[in-house]
Amino acid sequence: MKAAAFGEILWDEFGRSRTLGGAPLNAAGHIRRLGGEALVISALGCDELGDEAMEAVHELGIDDSFILRTPEYGTGRAIVTLSGGIPSYSFTYPSAWDMISFPEDTMEKLLSDSFDVLIYGTLAQRSEVSHRTLERILGSIDAKERFLDVNLRLSFHTPEIIRSSLSHATILKMNDEERPAVLSAAGCRSERELFDKHPDLSIAIVTCGKEGTWCFTAEGGSFHAEPAEVPVVDTVGAGDSLSAAFLFFHASGLDAEGALAKASMLADYVVQHRGAIPEYSEALRKKLFM
């Protein structure tokens, strides 16, 4: 599997500690851990945090060919507060990832490649610069699937951004709190109406925290994955691990129900560990690939 992920790279800060994050990076990191190829399209500052981020990207084995370094803006940070294991965020603005823009030759290099999936979200479109770059990519990239991971944070989204993002998607993922805003922006009352309105959309995933995850298909299927009863350390990155595993196993030939089961298994593992991309245990690998 070969994936490209567009959007934010940032440091999640928990008091005096920090971990590298951002939904696109987290998803790419898990795809690499699962055995796929991944690159991230983003921007970092020319600062110490940017240097540390690049080092972590290299350690994860992610292709950094399309990670811009900009001296004008600092590397992104998100101040994370946990309440009952559930995170809330405060973002630095503007940050380097608000300025994702490439020279024409770099863009042509990206668009000359082919991918199994392009992963993108709504948060990185909070700035017009990054939004325009993503629109250019969505209009021209050779990708079998276009995975929209809705990420509605604070006021960093508009109905127009949701609608334009949906218009390109073949797979949609949102959580139960984001679902009403997505359906409202699309002028729909249900996932079934989303499929009717967007003929390219084939799968819609709705994560519901402790209530598990639902997956709907354009053919009329609906599947539910119950979360395991495990001790929760934090949930940061759990949804991104679910995204990555679903895409990886679906691209590997599993149907939506089978891919969802694997994805839920990985998310259950991630919530038991600190950090969005923990090392995988041998026991987990055996369960995922049995």
Image (cartoon, rainbow, N blue to C red):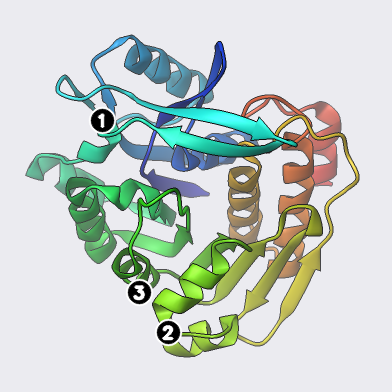
Q: Which numbered tag is attached to residue 167?
A: 3
- CB contact under 8 Å: marks 3 and 2: no
Say which of marks 1 and 3 sits in front. 1
User: What kind of residue is marked 1?
Assistant: Ala
Of mark 3 and mark 2, the one earlier in the sequence is 3
Q: Residue at x 35, y 66 (%)?
A: 165
The residue that disc 1 covers is 96
Q: Which residue is rendered at x = 71% and y = 59% of the image?
A: 208
Identify whether 200 is placed above or below 235: below
**Crowd class of label 3 (few under 14; some 14 to 19; many from 20; radius 10 Å):** some
Which class describes the residues within 10 Å of circle 1: few (<14), some (14-19), or many (20+)? many
Residue 246, by quadrant, is bottom right
Query: Does the rendering let one see residue 19?
Result: yes
Q: Is residue 281 left or right of residue 52?
A: right
Q: Earlier in the sequence, mark 2 or mark 1?
A: 1
Mark whose residue sits in front, 2 or 1: 2
Q: Is residue 49 above or below residue 28?
A: above
Q: Secondary structure at mark 3?
A: loop
Q: Disc 3 to disc 2, how far (Cα)? A: 13 Å
Q: CA distance from mark 2 to mark 1?
A: 33 Å
Q: Which secondary structure, mark 1?
A: helix
- Determine the residue located farthest toward the right in the rendered image: 229
Type of amino acid at the residue the image marks with label 3: Ser
Closer to us: 217 or 17: 17
> Is 288 situated left or right of 97 in this image?
right
Question: Is the Cβ of the residue at disc 1 closer than 8 Å to that at disc 3?
Answer: no
Q: Earlier in the sequence, mark 1 or mark 3?
A: 1
Helix, strand or loop under label 2: loop
Q: Which residue is mark 2?
A: 187
Q: Residue furthest left?
A: 104
